[in-house]
Amino acid sequence: MKEVRNYQVIVVGAGHAGCEAALASARLGADTLLLTMNLSTIALMPCNPSIGGPGKGHLVREIGALGGEMAACIDETCVQMKWLNTSKGPAVRSRRAQADKYLYRQRMTRTLFNTPNLTLRQGHVTEILVKEGRVSGVKLETGLEFECERLIVTSGTYLNSRIILGRATWPGGPQNQSPALGLSESLVKCGVSLRRLQTATPPRILKSSVDFSKLGELPGDPDSGGFLWENRLRRYERQISCFLAFTDEESVAAVRRNLSESPLMLENITNVGPKHCPSIDRKIMRFPDQIKHQIFVEPEGWESQELYLQGLTTGMPPAAQQEIVRSVKGLENAIIMRYGYAIEYDALAPGLIRKTMESRALKGLYTAGQINGTSGYEEAAAQGLIAGINAALAIKGQPSYWPSRTNSYMGVLVDDLSIWQKPEPYRITPGHAEFRLTLRDDSAERRLTRDGYLIGMVDEERFSRINAWTTRIEDELARLNDLSLFPSGEMREKLVSSGTGDLKKRVSGCEILQRPGISYNDVKALLADEKDDWLMAPDEIYSLETEIKYRGYFERESEKIAQTKFLESIRLPLAKVDERLASLSPHIAEFLLSDQFDDLNQLVRKNCLSRSDLAILLTVLRQDSEEVVGDPEVLND
Amino acid sequence: MSKARTDTIAAVATPPGRSAIGLIRVSGPAAFEILKRIFKTGGKKTFPLPHCAYYGSIIDPESGFIADKVLVTTFVAPHSYTGENLAEISTHGNMVVVSKVLQIALRNGARSADAGEFTRRAFLNGKMDLLEVEAVSQLLSAGSMSQARLALNQLDGLPSQFVSRIRSRLLDHLVQLEASLNFPEDAIEAIDEHILARDLKKILAELQIFAENARNGSMVAAGLKVALLGRPNSGKSSVMNYMLGRDRAIVTEIAGTTRDTLEESLTIGNYAIRLIDTAGLRQPGDRIEAIGIERTRSAVAEAFALIAVFDGSDLPDADDRLVMAELERSGKPYLVLRNKADLAQKLPDAFFDGKEQIVVSALKGSGLDRLVEELRRIIEDRGLGEYEELVLLGAQQAAALDKALTALERACAGAGRMYQDMLAIDLEEAVRELGRVNGETVDVNTLDLVFERFCIGK
Ligand SMILES: Cc1cc2nc3c(=O)[nH]c(=O)nc-3n(C[C@H](O)[C@H](O)[C@H](O)COP(=O)(O)OP(=O)(O)OC[C@H]3O[C@@H](n4cnc5c(N)ncnc54)[C@H](O)[C@@H]3O)c2cc1C
Ligand SMILES: Nc1nc2c(ncn2[C@@H]2O[C@H](COP(=O)(O)OP(=O)(O)O)[C@@H](O)[C@H]2O)c(=O)[nH]1
């Protein structure tokens, strides 16, 4: 049976990727249908009740800056908010929120329902319809068909998913949802190869069964502000604490006693899971000498009576889980409300998507989220946003958009994903970003909001407000740079006492600020009479001080950024490889013409090019390019 | 320019002329195919077995012409110099024969090798690291014993082992930092910044010594520069000519130098010396101009040692005083010559202000042996004698070492004071650049190491 109505964009799945994709597509004006297996579990958080942290928190800030939803949603629905890494430096400092899982779902669902151009329907998609080599629609389990021009599949951990609990295994999705059957086979028919991945979640225990006197309390930070620019100075007065417990000899012994029942030992599950969230079984096996492992005891919401045990992820059978949980000081009488489990699912083989999230295998098909081999809500949401934007831009006949490695963690994410070759799932961390000083948490708007505005994700009013703010910081930077002053009196004493020496000649405001122990407010005090519109907001001052104090680092980083930008600007595949490139190694020419890479920077990052190949390429390509860039020699840095 | 390593190259490996045998190397996937085509073995052994020597003839398959009776040795990949299939053809030393055999190889599928291409392939196939490659190229062009021994030391791989060790110590710290930066909630032990700072300082000190050895190494390899200073007509060219003359047999003109820099090479003991006459910096009678002083100073700055020549038969003038001042300023070892001892002396001893003079006559050749002796002593005092410690770096490697040092200096200055994320940026750069010195690896997969070494996970 064919549905009378055609859609321009269909999104399959209403997880974190699907929600962002559907919202972006609809907000950009594409007539969008969101199909999901269960309309009651939109934006479900099947695992940890938290959003943010280094890398992930940066993504959430960027999603907000580019006009996505996750930042706004978590800001409204968190039960705790705090800063991490503040003492370790501006590049890695990031917020982390503890979510009320139930409120998060409700709020996201409400946003979806209230968005024009967006239709929500429940349905289990079993087949991708293809006409003349491109996507033409989808077919449901019920036989119903919908037509579309662009299709975004965000099936998360549901494809042919299987639950594993010790020796017991059955087909099933997260949180007792049903598995998605049929779609995997259809994807394979479309030329998309799949692989099997696994992940697992810890048990949840009853709050009133915990002896909190034996745990350490981890309160939130009322002044941390929210992820969304509009919420940056928001105060969170009312918060719930997390708690910290530790394993000891007894817990390690309990794990050891039960290892034979671990899916790892039973080998009834694929071995390929996220490196960064190993199960407790795996941790004990890999680091046998470590006795003390942390367990964060986290609330799942304001009203929820369940506590999440971060650190005790396992797919062992129920009896073993109880033994392990109760071995932990403070959890001796814990009552498990939901057991942990492992789940195994189909995901795309690495390297099958472009940076736009469009499939290399089938025109009109996009994939985003866990299906692309990532793990984590934030990674899923970021991809969903990029996929949704590009599907809608394609409908409008506009050029596609991808963020650059040089301007965002989103850029790092999509770039890595399109050439990631490691077997395990991908999680973003600052370690993936080579320009992390530039990609700071506080600079998200300066890096992305203009893009959001040009695409149409950020409206005129929001853009002008944010733009006024970023301009204020940049103007002040320029002003301090031009300012020539000769510190006297109190300032002079301060400089001398901070051990940075006396000043013999006039210096710029920036030079003074660069000295250790000198703050913007000091400079302000020195020059109070000369000007009255000083920056007042702490976030503005923070950004300004950071950029001035680490100027040397920024300058070194920005040289490399310019090189990377140039390499990224050379899009692949090339239309042709002419005689001028004849002296390249033959396999390089193949790379340049084949659809394996999106841009030249990817070839460089994958070490496909020798110095001389790169030199030849740059010489030739520069002849063709308008852009003026640096010396090809330094490109090897 | 790189060519795919899919083709097979051939070249003569013995220097042209003299030697009693000629050696032609053929390397690449088709090496043995080519040999089968042009080589007929007399013996019963099947050709080619790995690592065997065969006696037989090189025959031009087109004409049937027998070029020479030869010995062919086979090396099978990866157990060869280049890491590829390799055949060595030993011919009789006659140049005509050698070039005939090479031509036959070239006409039957081999390509003429570019300069250094055998060594480059060895590097690309992981048979040598960059420091060793550098050593080979230096060895091939070595002009003195010290240069040759320096290159041989490098081939033993000692310097590259040192760089690897330093790099891995820095990498340990980097991994620790990255673990704590990327995973703040995983109970990774807090970094003790004092220990870190202390350790980085130690590493920096070791690396600075290594860099000093590299500077000495490149000095020795390039020849030690000795600058002759003195006002016009004090006798610099005469001194130079005399020194060259008594050593005429080994005088070579360094390629690429032009006459106007007035540079000549000779050896003293085991060392190659480059004598540089700063003549021509000023014309006689010119006023002392800033530009002339600048140029003299840069020659002085690059020099290993200085020889100042004064005309004993004349009164000191402004130029002489300038030269004297330069000697003091430079901080370099120097020798002071009172030249023209054969003429009546007007230059008062007081002018030398107690400095030891070597009294010579460049015209008569008197006193100049002592000059050479003193120069030898200066070189020895400088402690360049320990070949084992000297290091040779190519230009790119030296630049990488410099960058590594700068980054490490920044890290040292920042440790304990600067945010850890900045520290990590500096350490990462140091680790990356050191990788480049060795040509080992440039990528730094810190995150993989973090997961290997720490129990990360929620
Ligand atoms: C047990 C478990 C443990 C996890 N542990 C961690 C962890 O420790 N750390 C971490 O970062 N992340 C973890 N995750 C992953 C995290 O849940 C996901 O990264 C995130 O939810 C992925 O978002 P997504 O939008 O890609 O997919 P999901 O949130 O899984 O959403 C997929 C959506 O697609 C729908 N759908 C699927 N197939 C179809 C179909 N054929 N037709 C219609 N609708 C369909 C589903 O109903 C669902 O709404 C875990 C997940 C599970 C299940
Ligand atoms: N009598 C005498 N004349 C010398 C001596 N050394 C150099 N001269 C002469 O001094 C002049 C200048 O010498 P030259 O080596 O060209 O000086 P330069 O300008 O310092 O290089 C020439 O005419 C030499 O022959 C010496 O020891 N005794």
Image (spheres, coloured by chain):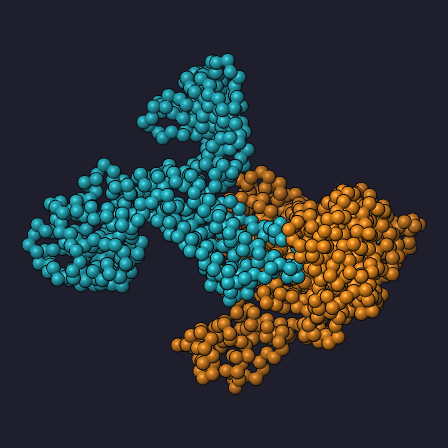
Residue B226 place in picture, x, y as percent = 26, 50
Asked whether, in this view, residue A627 is left or right of residue B310, the answer is: right
Asked whether, in this view, residue B23 is left or right of residue A573, the answer is: left
Residue A382 place in picture, x, y as percent = 72, 59
Quarter of the C terminus of chain B within the rendering: bottom right
Judge whether A385 appears above or below B79 on screen: below
> Residue shown at 88%/50% (left/top)?
A140
- Give whichever of A601, A3 is nearer the camera: A601
- Quick check: which quadrant has ligand 1? bottom right
Chain B palette colour: cyan
Asked whether, in this view, residue A556 is left or right of residue B297, the answer is: right
- Give whichever of A167, A563 is nearer the camera: A167
> Residue shown at 47%/28% (left/top)?
B26
Q: Which residue, as the protein is rendered here, is positioned at the far front?
A: A250
- Give whichever of A47, A391 is nearer the camera: A47
> Residue shown at 19%/51% (left/top)?
B236
- Label the orange chain with its letter: A
> Residue shown at 87%/57% (left/top)?
A38
Residue A575 place in picture, x, y as percent = 64, 46
Judge whether A453 appears above or below B218 on screen: below
Residue B204 place in picture, x, y as percent = 44, 56
- Residue A127 visible from this viewpoint: no
- Count of residue discs: 0
